């Protein structure tokens, strides 16, 4: 029984060469069609082709059937004998169909939808991986690119998210291939994968053409735009850079620009439809935005008009209310005047008698009479009560002459002015009598000198009568207090006037603001007697004349010209600039001469000139010449005194000036460390690295006062920086109780983390002061614009590490992490790094450190890879040594002969500074407590307190600053004792626990502190 089978349900994947029954049962079927045939039908030939087969296969089958006669397998009718060769049909069919069936199976497997979907999934995942590793390559370009260029595939050095393989893929795509155009290749791979997964179905050929052409165009355009950029990566890839280099060499800049314009125009044509669509959407959005803005303006105008109408209506209503209030006030005044006239007509005589001696009791009595009269009392009652008040007034008249009369004088005058208009019969002043109460008090405080003199004479007369009046009225103080209390209940302003003591006639002390504004703060005042060392301490310069004579210079010119002509390079002009150790020959090549042809002749020129090292600069930046640096046969020594005694150094306005030496043109070369802001010094042993560090330190010592600059010196070799120990009380900074020069490697991590804490503290001060850097902060502090209780003058801190490779080998990440953090953030806080090493490899100078240290000094190295590690280019391997160096800042190179300063000169400078009056101790860095460590306070600290405990606790609470260093400075005690006192305060609950170097938190106020000290 025949079987029909198909492995996939896809009509497009049919193939007559595929026998399903043979695949399932292990033997061929006798027919290829599943339709049953009658028994009398002749057996089909094994080579009968399916109706789905093509014409070629049918023709071939027919030809074969004509040439060969096959014998039937059984006694079947219709078959006869033949005269030709008899061939077994089954064997012939199998032998001929096996290779064709294998190809068909392979094609069918490839065409299978499941295989296509699997390949699409692989493409999609590969595209995502490539995108991740390329982005990670940009984020870690320093370490990844250094590893790729140096051939170092150490997994610990590669920072890429995809590991070494990812770094290699990203470096190949971005650096060696098409640059940022490689992202389009990643997109193309992802689009193909999604198309196979049937998620995104673009047209294949348009997609391929657009992606490839756009990627190539981006590579060419970016290669031209960034052709002169000093960048660690080719933005157009090596393809774009080399292509533009060839175009510029052959056709000039205009030819390269034309090719870029053509490629840009081609990309625009490819995306013309999309650009039109984007333009339409953008224009429609702009129109909608303009319409919304017009509607908003109309709405704002309508609201403004409504508000204006409402304002006018409100003003009209207020005007009506004001007029109504004025009318009511006029009626009230008229009523008061009528009442005043009535009272004046009834009591003309009493008013005259009461006027000179009216007191507070009389005022209250009059107020009661007036209220009683208004309630219906007769005029006769008023007269009787007034007679009683006259008797009381006579008594109070004597009391006013007593000892306390001066305290009530202002109140009595105020009451007289209050009552006088009521009884004088002057109707015009009745209304103003009450309104002048407060003004009289104010006028009493602002008396003229004449009024003060008169008041003083009256008080003196009253004091002379005090002996007579005091025994008669011993309770006058109590009475006056009662009167003050009663008056205070009725009028608080009068109570204040009665209780206020007389101001003493002394000179008013100047306020804190006046003191701060008096003169600028002088940071050098604390060491005002300090004198900078003299240049006489340095050896005088020896002037031996030019290091190259005329004959040598002319000989070199002739040899250069002949050698270049030998290699087919014609020059039109040559000039020489003689330096202390190197002579620069600037040549102008003839028309049509390639720069590259001269750049490759360095070894040949070195051979012809018999020079130690020839360096070619092709071309010299900002000049139309090519430079050839040839070492002098008799090099000169640049003395440190000639550099420091120059006008350039003396008149320098740099914050941290570094006088490094002289250039090829014999100019003094200086650089500002504050603007760099960090410096990397590298070179082989014996090439001048230590001398360069001494030159940097010396140039800073001759320019900055001890209050303005501090050094943190780390010397793993123990011998290079030991000369500066004399500067401990002037220029050095250290941890409390530790050596000023760090030679113990176990303490280096603590010092670096302490500098990180100092950096954080300084940044907090800058944030509070609203300053962006230390210079702005110090300028504000000097101008006394900052509170000295919360702020302080910040000196610059320069961290110098003499051999960084030794630290990295010993402690690795523990050293690299704080150094990388300081290099990235410490610039604004005034902390600058100078890192020196003899091993400029990628294991020591990692990418994270290089990215944040743009200033580089390269002395001579042996290998070109070391020069690439330091300067990102060759050149340091072509130096001659003995202080010959390359200074690089942001990719710009300058060849400098470093100034020479000998060990006796350094010792003389340090002794001169150390012999002067300095600070009591080095500049103290903040404490650093490693994580996991901290004050386990023993029980003995609770009962056995230090004698200074109470005083230190009051200081901490009053200043709200809990710091061991502050206790050391204030009480001149050691670090261990100050730390013990701080632990005791923590045990008593006065301060909080240590917070990893940050100041402790003060937990109590002064009242609670006194309670704790009393109950201990």
Image: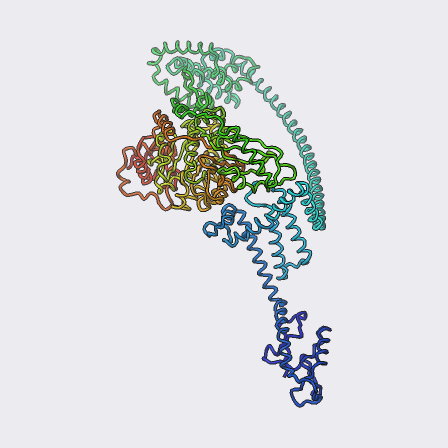
Q: Quadrant of the C terminus?
A: top left
Q: Splitting the image into 4 quarters, where does residue 120 fall? A: bottom right
Q: Position of residue 779 (x, y in %)?
A: 48, 27
Residue 259 against residue 571 in the figure, above or below: below
Asked if one can make out residue 404 in the rendered structure from this viewpoint, the answer is yes
Residue 557 against residue 333 in the figure, above or below: below
Q: Position of residue 97 (x, y in %)?
A: 64, 76
Q: Quadrant of the N terminus?
A: bottom right
Q: Is residue 786 left or right of residue 599?
A: left
Q: Nearer the viewer, residue 778 or 366?
A: 778
Q: Is residue 179 left or right of residue 83?
A: left
Asked if one can make out residue 281 in the rendered structure from this viewpoint, the answer is no
Residue 210 against residue 385 in the figure, above or below: below
Q: Nearer the viewer, residue 656 or 905?
A: 905
The residue under the point 30% across, 32% down is 973
Q: Splitting the image into 4 quarters, where does residue 426 fall? A: top right
Residue 743 against residue 10 in the figure, above or below: above
Q: Nearer the viewer, residue 259 or 415?
A: 259
Q: Position of residue 417 (x, y in %)?
A: 50, 15
Q: Nearer the viewer, residue 340 or 992?
A: 992
Number of marks drawn:
0
Rendering colour mode: rainbow
Q: Position of residue 492 (x, y in %)?
A: 46, 24
């Amino acid at each position: 029984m025949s079987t029909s089978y198909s492995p996939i349900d896809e009509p497009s994947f049919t193939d007559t060469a595929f026998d399903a029954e043979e695949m399932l049962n292990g033997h061929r079927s006798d027919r290829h069609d599943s339709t049953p045939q009658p028994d009398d039908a002749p057996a089909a030939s094994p080579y009968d082709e399916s109706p789905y087969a093509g014409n070629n296969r049918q023709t071939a089958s027919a030809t074969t059937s004509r040439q060969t006669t096959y014998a039937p397998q059984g006694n079947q009718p219709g078959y006869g004998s033949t005269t030709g060769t008899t061939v077994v049909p089954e064997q012939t069919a199998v032998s001929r169909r096996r290779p064709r069936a294998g190809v068909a199976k392979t094609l069918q497997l490839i065409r299978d939808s499941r295989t296509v979907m699997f390949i699409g999934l692989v493409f999609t995942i590969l595209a995502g991986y490539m995108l991740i590793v390329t982005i990670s390559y940009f984020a870690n370009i320093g370490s990844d690119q250094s590893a790729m260029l140096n051939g170092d595939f150490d997994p610990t050095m590669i920072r890429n998210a995809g590991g070494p393989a990812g770094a290699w893929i990203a470096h190949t795509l971005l650096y060696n291939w098409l640059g940022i155009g490689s992202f389009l290749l990643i997109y193309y791979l992802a689009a193909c994968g999604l198309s196979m997964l049937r998620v995104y179905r673009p047209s294949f050929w348009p997609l391929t053409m657009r992606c490839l052409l756009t990627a190539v165009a981006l590579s060419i355009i970016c290669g031209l735009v960034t052709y002169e950029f000093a960048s660690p990566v080719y933005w157009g890839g090596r393809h774009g850079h080399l292509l533009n280099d060839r175009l510029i060499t052959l056709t000039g800049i205009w030819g390269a620009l034309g090719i870029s314009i053509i490629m840009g125009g081609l990309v625009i044509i490819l995306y013309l439809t999309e650009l039109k669509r984007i333009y339409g959407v953008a224009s429609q959005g702009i129109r909608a935005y303009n319409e919304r803005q017009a509607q908003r303006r109309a709405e704002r105008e309508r609201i403004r008009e409504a508000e204006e109408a409402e304002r006018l209506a409100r003003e009209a209503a207020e005007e009506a209310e004001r007029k109504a209030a004025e009318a009511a006030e006029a009626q009230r005044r008229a009523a008061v005047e009528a009442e005043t006239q009535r009272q004046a007509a009834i009591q003309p005589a009493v008013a005259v008698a009461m006027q000179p001696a009216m007191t507070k009791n009389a005022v209250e009595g009059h107020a009661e009479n007036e209220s009683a009269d208004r309630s219906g009392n007769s005029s006769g009652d008023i007269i009787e009560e007034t007679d009683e008040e006259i008797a009381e007034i006579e008594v109070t008249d004597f009391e006013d002459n007593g000892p306390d009369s001066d305290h009530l004088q202002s109140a009595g005058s105020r009451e007289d002015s209050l009552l006088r208009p009521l009884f004088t019969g002057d109707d015009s002043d009745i209304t103003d009598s009450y309104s002048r109460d407060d003004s009289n008090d104010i006028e009493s405080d602002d008396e003229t000198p004449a009024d003060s003199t008169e008041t003083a004479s009256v008080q003196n007369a009253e004091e002379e009568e005090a002996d007579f009046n005091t025994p008669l009225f011993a309770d006058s103080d109590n009475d006056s207090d009662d009167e003050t209390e009663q008056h205070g209940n009725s009028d608080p302003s009068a109570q204040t006037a009665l209780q206020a003591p007389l101001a003493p006639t002394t000179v008013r002390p100047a306020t804190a603001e006046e003191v701060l504004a008096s003169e600028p703060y002088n940071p050098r005042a604390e060491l005002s007697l300090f004198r900078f060392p003299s240049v006489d301490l340095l050896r005088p310069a020896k002037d031996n004349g030019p290091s190259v004579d005329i004959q040598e210079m002319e000989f070199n010119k002739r040899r250069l010209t002949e050698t270049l002509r030998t290699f087919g390079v014609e020059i039109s002009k040559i000039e020489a600039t003689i330096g202390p150790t190197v002579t620069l020959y600037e040549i102008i090549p003839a028309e049509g001469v390639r720069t590259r042809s001269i750049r490759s002749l360095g070894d040949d020129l070195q051979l012809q000139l018999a020079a130690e090292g020839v360096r070619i600069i092709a071309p010299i930046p900002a000049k139309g010449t090519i430079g050839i640096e040839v070492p002098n046969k008799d090099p000169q020594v640049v003395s440190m005194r000639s550099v420091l005694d120059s006008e350039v150094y003396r008149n320098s306005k740099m914050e941290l000036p570094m006088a490094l030496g002289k250039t090829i043109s014999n100019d003094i070369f200086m650089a500002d460390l504050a603007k760099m802001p960090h410096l990397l010094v590298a070179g082989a042993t014996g090439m001048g690295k230590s001398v360069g560090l001494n030159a940097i330190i010396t140039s800073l010592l001759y320019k900055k006062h001890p209050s303005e600059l501090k050094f943190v010196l780390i010397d793993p070799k123990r011998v290079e920086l030991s000369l500066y120990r004399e500067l401990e009380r002037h220029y050095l900074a250290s941890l409390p109780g530790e050596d000023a020069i760090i030679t113990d490697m176990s303490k280096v991590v603590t010092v670096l983390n302490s500098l990180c804490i100092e950096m954080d503290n300084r940044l907090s001060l800058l944030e509070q002061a609203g300053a962006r850097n230390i210079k702005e902060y110090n300028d504000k502090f000097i101008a006394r614009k900052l509170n000295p209780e919360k702020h302080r003058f910040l000196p610059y801190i320069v961290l110098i590490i003499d051999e960084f490779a030794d630290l990295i080998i010993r402690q690795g990440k523990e050293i690299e992490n704080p150094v990388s953090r300081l290099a990235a953030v410490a610039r604004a806080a005034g902390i600058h790094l100078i890192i020196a090493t003899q091993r400029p490899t990628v294991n020591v100078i990692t990418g994270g450190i290089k990215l944040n240290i743009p200033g580089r000094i390269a002395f001579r190295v042996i290998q070109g890879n070391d020069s690439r590690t330091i300067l990102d280019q060759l050149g340091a391997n072509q130096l001659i040594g003995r202080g010959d160096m390359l200074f690089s800042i942001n990719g710009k190179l300058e060849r400098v002969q470093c100034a020479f300063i000998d060990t006796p000169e350094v010792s003389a400078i340090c002794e001169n500074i150390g012999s002067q009056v300095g600070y009591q101790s080095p500049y103290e860095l903040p404490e650093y407590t490693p994580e996991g460590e901290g004050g386990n306070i023993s029980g003995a600290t609770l009962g056995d307190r230090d004698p200074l405990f109470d005083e230190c606790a009051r200081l901490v609470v009053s200043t709200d600053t809990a710091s061991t260093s502050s206790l050391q400075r204030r009480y001149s005690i050691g670090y261990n004792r100050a730390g013990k006192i701080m632990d005791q305060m923590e045990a008593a609950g006065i301060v909080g626990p240590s917070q990893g170097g940050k100041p402790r938190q003060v937990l109590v106020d002064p009242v609670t502190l006194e309670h704790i000290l009393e109950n201990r």
